[in-house]
Image (spheres, grey):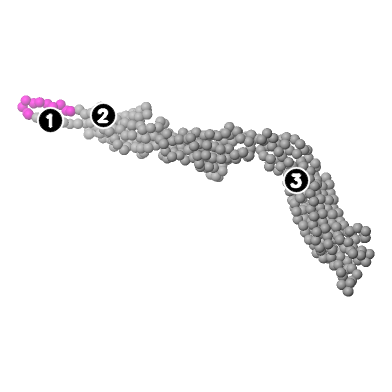
């Protein structure tokens, strides 16, 4: 800190006496101004505390006024030697203190305060985007008037506290000069960009992007899907088969057929009997059936068949939504139309493989081959965006 002193003084009269040669001497009562501050560099809007209490005036005179000129157009006259001042304009400010004693004599001293200007923010952003699109926010043209380096802090949503600190407007969702953000919901999305310069100067600016919904054409496509399994079971054995036929679709009906291979000579060797059980854990529904073994003209078989499991929905219409995924999710999770969702568990059990006429004392067929076919009629929602 440098200071400049300017003073005025009076000289006591030099009395010339005829009987004496010389003078009485000089006797000064000029005060001595001193000034200090708690900081020499601040940012616009910050306060500086000044202290002039080290100023003195030769006894018996005393300092009675402190005249402050802050170099920004504002002045103050105080009786005490301390004062605080807010600087609202950037640049170098010469602060001048003049002390005045009770004899009307004065002394002045100056010091310089540097007031750092905040960064200037310039944001380039699209006026609107569609839901699901990614927007680029560009603040690379922002600058520091003093030429310092800048730090960027993007808060993508001023209403949502993403870092959990209790303040939704101070999140650091991105920290580079450009940022990309995907908008999932329609409406006005408002965020805040904060820019900090190398001396701690801070500027903040809100930005808003309009997010508009998309328009989609919705229809349901009917499909027939078939599952087929086959194997061999000994009496008392079971096998379970698991699949999820209603994934991303609405099940309308199904037909299941369990077919057993015929005995070679059914009149001599009795038919076998298998059971078929289906369980839908998510739906809480299950049912069972068994093959018949009194039919000697056809393969032993068991059937389970149901239709109108869910309603056939409206098809072929336009709808506005944030995304195709949201539409599909809503359609597939329509209350009361979710029957058959989740895993299906088919269990086949060889309940009875009656002893056949022995061949060389051995039952020639202690089990049976089986085949299970299940056919589903499903409706799959198809969503196509209009006006892409």
Secondary structure state at the residue bearing disc 1: loop
> On residue 249, which mark appears?
3
Q: Position of residue 124 (x, y in %)?
A: 53, 34
First in residue order: circle 2 vs circle 3: 2
Of labels 1 and 3, earlier in sequence is 1
Residue 24: assigned label: 1
Mark 2 secondary-structure assignment: strand
For the residues marked 2 and 3, what is the alpha-carbon distance in whole angstroms?
94 Å
Q: Position of residue 192 (x, y in %)?
A: 53, 37
Residue on which disc 2 sits: 106
- Contact between marks 2 and 1 (CB within 8 A): the answer is no
Front in this rendered view, residue 387 or 66: 387
Which mark is nearer the camera, 2 or 1? 2
Q: Is residue 46 visible?
A: no
In which quarter of the view is residue 187 placed? top right
Quadrant location of the C terminus? Answer: top right
Give left or right: position of 12 versus 118. Answer: left
Based on the displayed image, in which of its 4 quarters is residue 260 positioned? Answer: bottom right
Q: Tell me which residue sits at (75%, 53%) in the image.
A: 243
Is 50 one of the magenta-colored residues?
A: no
């Amino acid at each position: 800190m440098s200071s400049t002193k300017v003073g005025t003084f009076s000289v006591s009269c030099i009395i010339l006496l005829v009987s004496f040669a010389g003078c009485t001497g000089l006797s000064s009562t000029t005060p001595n101004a001193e000034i200090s501050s708690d900081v020499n560099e601040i940012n616009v809007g910050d306060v500086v505390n000044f202290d002039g209490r080290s100023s003195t005036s030769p006894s018996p005179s005393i300092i009675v006024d402190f005249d402050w000129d802050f170099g920004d157009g504002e002045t103050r006259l105080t009786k005490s030697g301390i004062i605080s001042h807010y600087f609202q304009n950037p640049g170098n400010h010469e602060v001048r203190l003049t002390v005045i004693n009770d004899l009307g004599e004065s002394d002045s001293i100056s010091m310089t305060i540097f007031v750092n200007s905040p960064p200037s923010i310039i944001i380039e952003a699209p006026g609107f985007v569609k839901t699901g699109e990614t927007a680029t926010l560009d603040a690379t043209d922002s600058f520091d008037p003093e030429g310092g380096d800048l730090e960027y802090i993007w808060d993508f949503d001023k209403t949502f506290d993403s870092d959990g600190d209790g303040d939704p407007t101070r999140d650091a969702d991105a920290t580079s000069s450009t940022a990309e953000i995907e908008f999932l919901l329609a409406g006005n999305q408002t965020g805040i960009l904060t820019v900090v310069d190398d001396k701690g100067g801070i500027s903040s600016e809100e930005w808003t992007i309009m997010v508009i919904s998309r328009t989609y054409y919705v229809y349901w496509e009917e499909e027939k899907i078939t599952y087929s399994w086959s194997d061999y079971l000994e009496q008392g054995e079971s096998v379970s088969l698991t699949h999820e036929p209603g994934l991303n679709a609405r099940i309308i009906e199904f037909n299941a057929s369990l077919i057993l291979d015929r005995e070679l000579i059914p009149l001599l060797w009795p038919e076998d009997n298998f059971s078929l059980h289906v369980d839908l854990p998510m739906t809480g529904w299950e049912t069972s059936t068994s093959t018949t073994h009194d039919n000697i003209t056809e393969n032993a078989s068991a059937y389970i068949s149901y239709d109108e499991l869910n309603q056939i929905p409206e098809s072929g219409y336009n709808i506005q939504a944030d995304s195709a995924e949201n539409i599909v999710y809503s359609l597939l999770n329509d209350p009361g139309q979710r029957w058959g969702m989740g895993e299906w568990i088919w269990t086949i059990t060889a309940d009875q493989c009656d002893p056949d006429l022995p061949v060389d004392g051995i039952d020639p067929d202690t089990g049976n081959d089986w085949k299970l076919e299940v056919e589903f009629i499903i409706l799959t929602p198809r969503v196509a965006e209009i006006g892409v």
